[in-house]
Image (tube, rainbow, N blue to C red):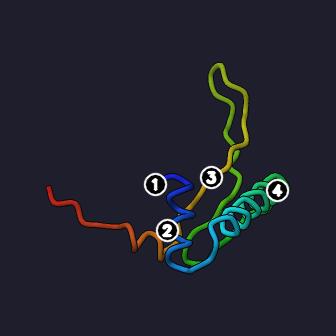
Amino acid sequence: MVKEEFIREVSNRTGLRQVDISKSLESGFRIIGERLKDGEPVIFRGFGTFKIRRRAERNGRPPDVVPSFEPGKELRRTVSYKVIT
């Protein structure tokens, strides 16, 4: 699913205009990025946590700071399935 499909589906489920959903989504992304830049995690209970992860220096690569996402319990439950081997 791409962003446009996501916006369309939210619009269909809520009755809100796609342009309004798009503006809200973009604002949310900006806020998450700003908070992460400040070193603050962004927590959505049940969904997951966006946070900064520091990567150690490796052979030929300098240390780095990257965004990461840890899924919450509800999200893990929603997408989990049993693998039959």
Q: Residue 9 carries which label?
A: 2
Which tag, 3 or 1, sits closer to the chain's start? 1
Question: Badges 4 and 2: C-beta atoms under 8 Å apart?
Answer: no
Which corner quadrant holds the C terminus? bottom left
- Left or right: 76, with 29 as reference point: left
Q: Position of residue 57 (x, y in %)?
A: 69, 31
Tag 1: amino acid: Met
Q: Which residue is drawn at 81% across and 60% down?
A: 35
Tag 3: amino acid: Ser
Tag 2: amino acid: Glu
Q: Where is residue 51 in the image (x, y as percent from the top left)?
A: 69, 58
Q: Residues within 10 Å of mark 2 (few under 14, many from 20)?
A: few
* Residue holding disc 1: 1
Q: Which mark is residue 85?
A: none
Question: Badges 2 and 3: C-beta atoms under 8 Å apart?
Answer: no
How far is disc 4 from disc 2 in space, using C-alphas? 27 Å
